[in-house]
């Protein structure tokens, strides 16, 4: 048997391995192409036991807040989402920033990644738990004598990716694909060499040119979706969009902590992007789901003029303005979890923001 870690660390994407993911139920609905997928945004697993260098404090004030969140709100959030699971859910997806990270030692990062997966998996023992890396999953912090780089992609590949490979029952690389019925699910790593991910994307569509629905899971958004950091998008976002437009794809992203649904057209085809947030201390607040920005003009009005002039923000905003923005909504009080309802009738996102078991809002993605 080949060394699985050597495979996991490989960046080459040629000949990606895929499989037809079958619902564990074999239910009538699943056979008919009707099923759901449970989706989480950032969850930032944290704990003081991982910060083991004497004299070092938490990297940010949020580290302690995230730890406190994991003592109460996150177990409640996962329990509420698991209560709605059924056999029509083939897998559960987390969209990156599984951990808070910012640790100095490789051993600390590996331990946090391993513990984080196990902490979430226990809520979904009979369902595949899948994820992609976020910036916090690769982030380092500490004395220069200990930390050689601010980013550590190797530890994620060694400590976390094997969990995903075990869930799927096959070897995977940085990017991977699931084919479920007639639908294509692409797990897209925005933190490796961009040329390799673009190559992977093109090869995937050469292999699977015809699909009912195409989903791309990514941590960094494709389109500007946050007033605070509209320019923090995936590398080569224009090239990725050109490819996805050809397939009327749905993009599921995280990172911003601001839930949103955006639909954009290039004049011929469309891409819908949904951003999810699962930050525990912002859910179950008792406040109603609300639309913060109901169109792109309102979003621009909230972006400071000085920020809009910065190249990293101006370019993605100008790019969006060059396209047809069919709808653009940013939400307040929409943090929690999302169930995608997928069928021949389309794709709908149900936003659950509290423990009631009832969706706070349903948005049509396609």
Image (tube, rainbow, N blue to C red):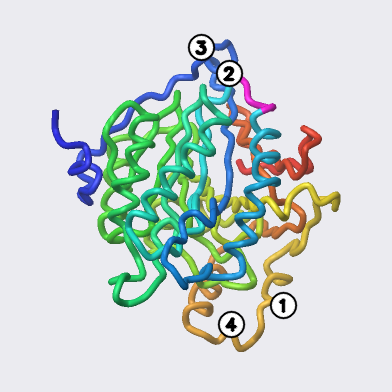
Q: Nearer the viewer, mark 4 or mark 2?
A: 2
Query: Which residue carries the number 4 mark?
Result: 308
Tell how many labels. 4
Separation of marks 3 and 4 at Cα, in angstroms: 51 Å
List x then y, in percent, for residue 33.
54, 21
Pointer 2: residues within 10 angstroms few (<14), some, or many (20+)? some
Mark nearest the camera among 3 and 2 is: 2
Instruction: Work out how far the residue at label 4 is from the one at label 2, CA to CA, in angstroms.
Output: 46 Å
Question: Which residue is denoted by mark 1 in the rendering?
Answer: 301
User: Which residue, given by chain and number where applicable, does mark 3 sit on?
Assistant: 26
Which of the two labelled residues, at mark 1 and mark 3, occupies the earlier sequence position?
3
What quarter of the picture does the C terminus occupy? top right
State if disc 4 and disc 1 touch (CB < 8 Å).
no
Q: Which residues are magenta?
A: 83-87
- x and y, in percent, of residue 41 in the image: 58, 49
Query: Going from the N terminus, do you reach mark 2 or mark 1 first?
Result: 2
Q: Secondary structure at mark 2?
A: loop
Q: Circle 2 is placed at which residue position?
A: 87
Tell us which disc is closer to us: 2 or 1. Answer: 2
Q: Nearer the viewer, residue 53 or 35?
A: 53
Residue 152, located in which quarter of the rendered image?
A: bottom left
Observer-side mark, 3 or 4, equals 3
């Amino acid at each position: 048997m080949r060394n699985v870690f050597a495979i996991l660390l490989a960046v080459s994407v040629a000949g990606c391995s895929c499989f037809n993911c079958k619902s564990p139920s074999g239910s009538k609905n699943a056979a008919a192409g009707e099923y759901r997928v449970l989706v989480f945004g950032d969850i930032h697993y944290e704990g003081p036991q991982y910060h083991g260098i004497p004299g070092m404090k938490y990297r940010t004030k949020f580290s302690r807040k995230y730890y406190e969140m994991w003592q109460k709100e996150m177990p409640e959030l996962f329990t509420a989402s698991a209560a709605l699971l059924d056999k029509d859910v083939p897998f559960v997806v987390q969209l990156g920033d599984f951990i808070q990270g910012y640790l100095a030692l490789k051993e600390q990062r590996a331990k946090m990644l391993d513990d984080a997966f196990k902490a979430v998996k226990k809520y979904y023992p009979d369902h595949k738990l899948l994820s992609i890396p976020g910036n916090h999953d690769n982030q380092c912090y500490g004395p220069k004598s200990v930390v050689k780089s601010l980013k550590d992609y190797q530890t994620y590949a060694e400590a976390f990716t094997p969990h995903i490979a075990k869930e799927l029952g096959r070897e995977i690389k940085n990017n991977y694909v699931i084919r479920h019925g007639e639908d294509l699910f692409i797990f897209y790593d925005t933190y490796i060499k961009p040329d390799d991910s673009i190559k992977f994307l093109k090869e995937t569509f050469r292999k699977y040119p015809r699909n009912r629905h195409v989903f791309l899971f990514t941590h960094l958004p494709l389109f500007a979706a946050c007033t605070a950091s509209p320019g923090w998008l995936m590398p080569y976002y224009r090239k990725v969009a050109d490819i996805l437009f050809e397939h009327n794809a749905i993009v599921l992203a995280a990172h911003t902590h601001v839930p949103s649904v955006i639909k954009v057209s290039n004049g011929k085809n469309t891409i819908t992007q949904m951003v999810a947030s699962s930050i525990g201390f912002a859910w179950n607040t008792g406040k109603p789901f609300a639309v913060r920005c109901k169109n792109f003009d309102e979003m621009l009005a909230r972006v400071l003029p000085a920020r809009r002039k910065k190249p990293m923000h101006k370019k993605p905003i100008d790019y969006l303005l060059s396209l047809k923005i069919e709808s653009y909504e940013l939400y307040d009080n929409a943090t929690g979890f999302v169930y995608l309802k997928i069928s021949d009738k389309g794709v709908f996102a149900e936003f659950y923001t509290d423990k009631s078991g009832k969706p706070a809002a349903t948005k049509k993605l396609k």
